[in-house]
Image (cartoon, helix red, strand yellow):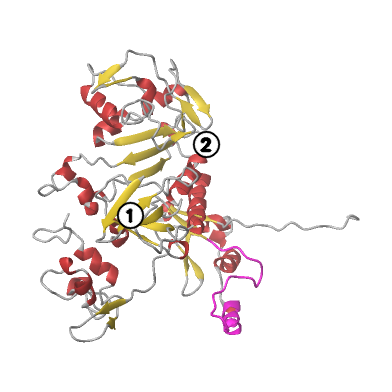
Amino acid sequence: MYRLVQEHPTTSVKMVFLEDKNLDMRRYNAPTLCTEVAAIFVGDNGEPPANRDICVFPVGDTCQSISPLNQCCDPMTYPLLFPRGECSWNTGMEHVEERRTAKRTRVTQLQYYAYRLSQRNGFSILHNSGSPRHMQQNYQDAMAMVRKFGKPDLFLTFTCNSSWSEILNSMEGVQRPENRPDIIRGLPHAHILLTLDSESKIRTKDDIGKFVSAELPDPCTDLRLFQIVTKCMVHGPSGTINMNSPCMRDGQCCKSFPKQFKDDTEENVNGYPIYRRRATEPVQVWKYSIDSRWVVPYNPWLLKKFNAHINVEVSASVKSVKYLYKYVYKGHDAASVKIQKEGALDHDEILSFVEGRYVSAPEAMWRLNEFNLPHKSHTVVRVAVHLPQQQRIVYQDGQEAQAIEPAALRKTTLTSWFELSKNDPSAHNISYSDIPQYYVFHKSTTNWKKRQRGGQNVIGRLPVVMIPRYSFPESL
């Protein structure tokens, strides 16, 4: 339980983060740093409030409301960020000459704040998820790559190391890494699926040992690897059972640590191998005694290359593809909080419990800089599937008839492919799902044109089509 306390002359107000094991702890996990800056707001489906009400009280005058678009709004609301009294963003702010384009001449709010919050020489303003539909679309894109190249061979989880010299060298004064969300962005970890070429495929259990190790290295033969493994690759801070750890479920570790000693690797057990963990004498690390049962599988070369937590698993099924997208799009971070007002007479115990969206400083920086969550090595083109005269249209309420007429004349990727197959002999032997690799669909002309380059990095896919079940007469 984490408490944020604000004292009042007559009332003590406390915000308490509740930890309920019935909640999804991937989303409702409490803050781990007492100095973390975050915002909690309540809205429909986690959406931020659409508008802000800002009032000023001029001396000797009544309250006056100002627009959030006013260039004086931010300096009055956040004076510490504008110590010289300069104006903030406004709707007429133009790009510098080298950034100006025909389509974009003015600076957006997002671009302005991303610029203001960036660390630069001589200037610093820093004083110290996706929808379920998006997840399904990206998951199907990934499965299209599996259809073309086969299942992934390796599954990597790469976590940033806050002790990297590049991070520590950027600290100023008494700053700590958590004070610089613009650099560490919350110590993110990337989930990476890799498919090996045919010559490097993992075919036997002996091949597994070439990529993955789950044992403590010998400090006498490789001291640096031993130091990294004992610091970054031991499950839990001490290699012991911690009943308060997030991985504990009903008194058991959900990751099945400690593992069993194994003299040899066993292949494909519930989608993953059981790696070799030979019984050796425990080693003393700080005040703890650790053996290979607590070691998270890793690749020695990657550990010495990046000096970070890099979990490497051999993937024996396509389950890892679905896990990746379910994890990334599990939903926005949330908080279940309780507001306590000691000494208040109008305390409402029911209304004091609040479910809100939790936005930390690292997430805010990530969104301001417009970083993407997913990245794929290949472009997946989604082609349309529909029945005759039942293509998708977009319309405004009350304008259905006006939208139907032009839509009936507009060709889709499917109807245009029918024409292409009839008129272009080179397309006769290409299936519809593979056509984007060889042709490009031009939305302006609604025609497929032969691709000039880059086809080797393009994959086409059809959407998942749900066919309704029909009831047939018993006479049939």
Element type at marker 2?
A: loop
Amino acid marked by disc 1:
Lys
| Residue at the spot of label 1 | 14
Residue 21 belongs to the span the image colors magenta: no
Which quadrant would residue 84 be assigned to in this image?
A: bottom left
Instruction: Identify residue for label 2.
Output: 317
* Dominant secondary structure (helix, strand or loop) of the stretch shown in magenta: loop
In front here: 41 or 124? Answer: 41
184 or 347: nearer the viewer:
347
Q: Which residue is most to the right? A: 475
Magenta span of residues: 383-408
The vertical placement of 195 against 377, above or below, is above
Q: CA distance from mark 2 to mark 1?
A: 48 Å
Side of 172 relative to 142 (left or right) = left
The residue that appears at 87% across and 58% down in the rendered structure is 473
Q: Amino acid at mark 2?
A: Ser
Of circles 2 and 1, the one toward us is 1
Give residue 422's mark: none
Image spot of residue 345 (x, y percent): 39, 62
- Image position, residue 101 (x, y; %): 26, 74
Viewer-nearest residue: 188 or 393: 188
Q: Earlier in the sequence, mark 2 or mark 1?
A: 1
Kindly state the secondary structure of the residue where label 1 is placed. strand
> Residue sitting at 45 percent across and 45 percent down?
20
Residue at (37, 50) in percent of width and height: 17
